[in-house]
Amino acid sequence: MKILAFLGIVIFFATTFSQYGHAQIPRACTDEASLRDLTCCPTTSNGVCGAVAGRGACMDLQLPHSNTTTDVRRNWPHYFTRACQCTGNFSGYDCSRCKFGHYGADCSRYQVLSRPSVADFDVTDWDDYNRILNLTRTYDSGYVAVLEETYPGNTSLRTAPLTLYGMLIWSHHYAAKDSQSLELRVNGAPLDYAHTAPGFNTWHRLQSVWFEWEIQGMLNSMADPNYHMFRLPWWDWRRESQMTTGLGADDLFVANRAGYSKNVSGRPVVAGDLFGEGWETMCWFRVGQICDPTENTGLLQRCPFTGTNPCSTSNPDWPSAADVLTALVIPEFDVAPYNIQTVGGYRTFVDFQIGTVSVEDCRDDRQCRCVPSLDPSCATNTAEPTQKSGMHLLGHIIMGQGDFNFRLNNDMSTIGTIEDVAASPNDPMFILHHNMIDCIFIEWMRRFPNAEYPMNVSTVGHARDGFIIPFFPLYTNNDLFVSAEELGYSCNLFGGAVNTSMSVSLLLILGMLAFALTQ
């Protein structure tokens, strides 16, 4: 099986405290005593926080106190002032696990493994991967979703259990539930803790390595001796840029091979597809809401671009190899004002903005992010430029291929599930797409090893030492702004061994040529 890899990081405990909250927290910390005492220090076979074995200790969180109640998420976590602080290579909310990338009884073994491209998968690899994904849909994550706004110290919370895959979806939805809201905005921009600001790369990197880590734990619990070798794959959509019919969304997961039915464009994924007996969704079309993970919000829907696709009449191109080369020569990670209004910087280019066109053209171009019916700040003067979608957003648009006015029309049948930003992890293509985005980020950091996460970011939820919401134990954006090899995994965009020999000067020349060819 080619699927393996991983990450390691030091847990940093410090947070803020709010009056009300809802989030995902360990089930082991939802008993009356833990909630009353604001303490998440579970007892394991090695004592509280594994203290008997020297794994950790229950300690006060260093809380930069905040009384803000504008949005409870910015004061994460809400319920605890004491938690386990793990030592050495130990990790987890109870210190019973190893840090990302470490394994073994004493967590002393460490490895850096390269994530595989799905282009190298054979039939067995696909079957293995889909089998594991289906297991995560029912495997208990050990976390619960808190479904009500309540105060710290409340000993009776209304919660719902989260499977591993459910937590993948719920955490993203919780962080981005207002990303397509027409109401909750900060300085004219949607309030989003995972997108359109510097934390975009670090938020999704943590989500990916956390999911990978949890799958390793699941496999270990099933006595798989190679559990630590599992790594999530990525999809190199540079190879798709010349496709005119079909899309990897069909061809990758419902391959043209005996025994599997073709996923017809625009219909839900149902029995007979590689996903199993119907791939049900949660949190879909729950904009601005705290969703209940036990609610089935319908079967997964895709609208990959084809000539007969009923969901769209336009066929935007996939990001190209030229786009990637252009991104790799941008020296600044991000630039002020560090939000959706930012023009320039690597993160913006990859995340949501790849170039400019006239507003008049933008209205008829599905690659544009400035949609007048959704964004009142969109210009009306045809001479004023606006931005076309970056590589990340464009992937969602192509695989969703829906009507950008679906929020106003209240009709989710016009989009693929992955175009509902907050609920997009429902589609397993989300994992492959975002791992490709991380591959580009890995390569960029190799080119600019001295790059730093911006210091003075005021965008809510994206500060350098801000916590990545809603993950627990706690990680800051700066914790994840390190080389992938330092974290225990890698990805090679250019094949073979890690490509560190190509100079930034050469990349700059190639990037300039690539950009010129796209104009």
Image (cartoon, rainbow, N blue to C red):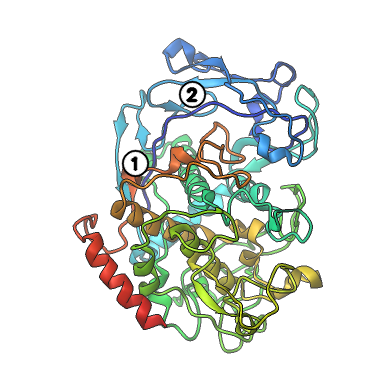
Residue extending farthest to the left is 501
Report, in whole angstroms, how far the alpha carbon at label 2 lies from the one at label 1: 19 Å
Q: Residue at x 36, y 32 (%)?
A: 103
- 494 or 500, which lies in front? 500
Please state the horizontal and vertical placement of residue 345, each as a whole percent of the image.
Answer: 45, 59
- Left or right: 129, with 24 as reference point: left
> Where's the C terminus, which quadrant?
bottom left
Q: Position of residue 393 (x, y in %)?
A: 55, 66
Q: Which residue is mark 2?
A: 95
The front one of 81 and 50 is 81
Q: Give amino acid for label 2.
A: Cys
> Residue at 47% of width from left, 64% of height from top?
349
| Residue 378, quarter of picture | bottom right
Disc 2: CA contacts within 10 A as few (<14), some (14-19) or many (>=20):
many
Residue 115 seen from this side: no
Q: Nearer the viewer, residue 257 or 386?
A: 386
* Helix, strand or loop for disc 1: loop
Measured from the top left, where is residue 169 in percent x and y?
62, 51
Q: Around disc 1, counting alpha carbons within 10 Å, would you say few (fewer than 14), some (14 to 19), or many (20 or more)?
A: many
| Image quadrant in which you'd find residue 468 | top right
The location of residue 235, given as percent across then percent down, is 42, 64
Q: Quadrant of residue 272?
A: bottom right
Q: Would residue 422 be seen by someone viewing this image from the given angle?
A: yes
Foreground residue, 507 or 121? 507
Disc 2 on helix, strand or loop? Answer: loop
Q: Are marks 2 and 1 in contact (CB under 8 Å)?
A: no
Label 1 sits on residue:
488
Choose mark 2 or mark 1, whichever is in front.
1
Lower sequence index among marks 2 and 1? 2
User: In the shown orientation, is residue 261 left or right of residue 268?
Assistant: left
Total marks placed:
2
Residue located 67% across and 39% down the image: 74
